[in-house]
Amino acid sequence: MHVIRIPSPRAVIDRRGLTTRIAALVEEHGATGARKEIVPLLRDALAQGREEIAERLVATPSAGHALAEAQAFLVDQILRIVHDHVVTDVYPASNRSKGERLTIAAVGGYGRGEMAPHSDVDIAFLTPIRCTAWCEQVIEAMLYFLWDLGLKVGQSSRSLDEMVRMCKSDLTIRTAMLEARYVWGDQDLFEEARQRFWKDVVSGTERQFVAEKLAERDSRHKRMGDSRYVVEPNVKEGKGSLRDLHTLYWIGKYIHKVRSPAELVNVGLLTPKEYRAFRRAENFFWAVRCHLHTITRRTEDRLTFDLQREVAARMNYADRPGKSAVERFMQYFFLQAKVVGNLTGVFLAQLDEQVAQRPVRGLLATFRAKARTVKGYKVFGGRIHAPSEKWFAEDPVRLLDIFVIADREGLEVHPETLRTIARDAVLIRDEVRKDPRANALFLELLTSRRDPEKALRTLNEAGVFGRFVTEFGRVNAQMQFDMYHHYTVDEHTIRAIGLVARIEQGELQDDHPLAYEIIGKVRSRRALYAAVLLHDIAKGRGGDHSVLGAEIAMKLCPRLGLDEEETELVSWLVRHHLIMSATAFKRDLSDSKTIGDFVGLVQSIDRLRQLTLLTIVDIRAVGPGTWNSWKRQLIGGLYGAAEERLRLGHAEYGRENRIAAKRAAVEAQLGSDTALLEEIGDHFADAYWIAEPDDVITKNLAQYQASMDEPLSIQSEYYPARGATLVTVIAADHPGLFYRIAGGIHLAGGNIIDARIHTTRTGRAVDNFLVQDPLGRPFQEEAQLERLRTSIENALANRVQLLPQLHARPDARPRADAFDVRPRVLVDNKASNRFTVIEVNARDRPALLNRLAYTLFDERLMVHSAHIATYGERAADTFYVTDLLGDKLLSQTRIRGVEKRLLEAASEATGEAAAA
């Protein structure tokens, strides 16, 4: 039987002393009269016990097991005191019948003897037969005491027969009872219940339980993001979390009747070294969970951004060059989650060997192949085995060779062999890293035409990847403390490599038609895969990771076997891997200078193709929903314009030709309305024709003609080509129009992702906005579209006070408060021939764009286009502006004044929104 023993137990709670005081109160006031004294007494004892445990948590912030056990010990003693008071003083029974027996069992996590400070108290009241009146009275009285103490109780009351029946029919109840631990009451009855459980419930259902538990685990993982490396993990339920460790224990207990995790070693499911890793990970996760409950004063198991900093500080993590305390803490967290993943893999495969051979699926199941040999390895049942314990020690290059063979043959590495690999990974030293055979094998794995993602993930989890490419080992399990990146650096990189392979195999042709079209045209696919591997390799070192990564590429690529030309290409791609997305998302692609500058950097079509592929997989591998049709459109537009410029070789591809081509395309779309082009086409300046897509021009012309005699026309419609809502406002042009429209859109719940502001030759403004909701989805419902139109109209008519209402709006992403984004303003007069380009970086807030637009208006600047990019909690708003005469800002004094005002505006928007 599991008895909880903790150091200095009476410092947590003195059961004997409390029992004596309760007896005295009962003697003085009687059982009923004493209740109003007993409840506060126990409540104080519980609070003092929690305070003592909290002090122990401060003194030993990493002692997870000790603290979880102390919490369970505290609850045990409270239950015992309450039980004894009720059966002795409240409902004493001198001659109890055989049916008037009661035992209290802790179940679930509490049954295991581990609790976080605000965990539920899960208990089972068990009786030999159907509950008698006395048993009901005792249970009810106990529950009222526990509720009065503020405990969250999950309880059941069942006879032994009911317990057996419920356990058979419900997996959750069966799992809870699997952990059952005697707390107090009739000990013989508990032993009888335990024997009934093993005999009547467990016997013969072992394989079914394992299958159901693993299916339950898979379902839970999908719910939690299906990765061990999500950046806001759930310490209890997430992949690689406490629940995964508990699942291993439950399975081991169900199959082998082990009474503690240590016994998993005795039954051959874990080695002693793996058991120590099991306990270390479990201890760390328990410590984190106890801190989360203590900080929030509630049941909180999600390690959210705002809590990560505080837990890291409480667990004594400190800043280091290139890595903050929170990043170091989270890196250790993910390393432990990775350990849990490795343990799960070897445990389940070992169990599979013990229970039964894995079934072969498909038509050939009855023709199961006999064991065979491949390059000295034994292959059986879809698994590859090392032939001996010394196999890798004899030639450490085999530590890579086995993964290449497994990839080629579509095999899995046997768990015993994975254990040997994990043990022998330390044999990978400099001589192995420099060995041409080893590097050729690694390059083959990296550029596999089968499944490099699976192969590299297995290589990483076996501990070989980071040993062979030590630079990759440094970013193993490294998180990036922001709301943009969903995964750790190593997981992001491996996912990106998998995306390249899937694009190459045609799996993602519908999602990435451009990438699929050009991937077969790149001159070196080895360079492409190497660039994807290395693009984030220098994160966490301090300094610009693109520059540092390019230097690493120059050293590493020759070692891997790439030639001089490939090495230079990889280094260039790593150095500039962010330039294409920055240009596409933050610059005006209709501006000839934008394309010219980009092409001047890229210089060749092959580089353009390689960079485009790297950019696409880098964005998509950031996390779910990061890649969308709007980004596809922008990247595709930049690629098309740059490819055309590189192919034709013009410094500026004929402006007149481009306008003529656009007018012809619009004419084709207008069909029978071609007269419209003749009537009002010349109202629009050349810049308008170059900037807007032909389908938008077609819509604008029709709206413009229909609103000739109206002071204001607002249209909003779903625009599937951009994955956004197109909002067009036509009005008499006047200063401040842009900031008012922006405010109206934000008040309607919209986020502007792109804006083009035009003035016709007749003095009317034609402003096109692309709008999404805060989660990156378009407005499609008519009610949403109408709300947009009404809100803009109210803002333009001055019917609403924009700033107060914007500040009062709840932030769609309040977790951004956890991040400190220092506002930054960049003024660039070289990015465009016609405009001054102003980029403002700040924390994303509902009032930000409106505040910045108002400041530009107040500074007497004309906004001609705006491009809004968000990266998690960070917004990058870019404005193409001129002064009121249409000239660039050239005076340094004026530029410094604008910079100062915009910095103040960005800081005010953030501060006021936070205070609202």
Image (cartoon, helix red, strand yellow):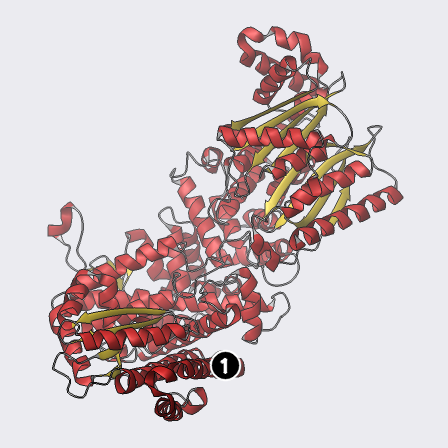
Picture quarter containing residue 30? bottom left
Q: Quadrant of residue 803?
A: top right
Q: Position of residue 200 (x, y in %)?
A: 11, 70
| Quadrant of the snapshot with the N terminus | bottom left
Q: Position of residue 418 (x, y in %)?
A: 32, 67
591 and 729: which is toward the camera: 729
As rendered, which of 477 and 655 lies closer to the eye? 477
Query: In the rendered image, is residue 203 in sight?
Result: yes
Near-viewer residue (441 or 690): 690
Crowd around label 1: few <14 · some 14–19 · many ≥20 (10 Å): few
Is 706 located above or below residue 876 in the figure? Answer: above
Look at mark 1 in the image and give the residue it sits on. Answer: 51
Nearer to us in this view, 686 or 254 = 254
Q: Is residue 542 left or right of residue 218?
A: right
- Residue 63, above or below 219: below
Is 760 on the left-hand or right-hand side of 630?
right
In the image, what residue type sits under mark 1?
Answer: Glu
Residue 461 lies left or right of residue 306; in this view the side is: left
Residue shown at the point (28%, 72%) measured from the top left: 249
Q: Is residue 422 above or below residue 28?
A: above
Picture residue at 61% right of the left edge, 63% below the top: 541
Q: Position of residue 248 (x, y in %)?
A: 29, 69
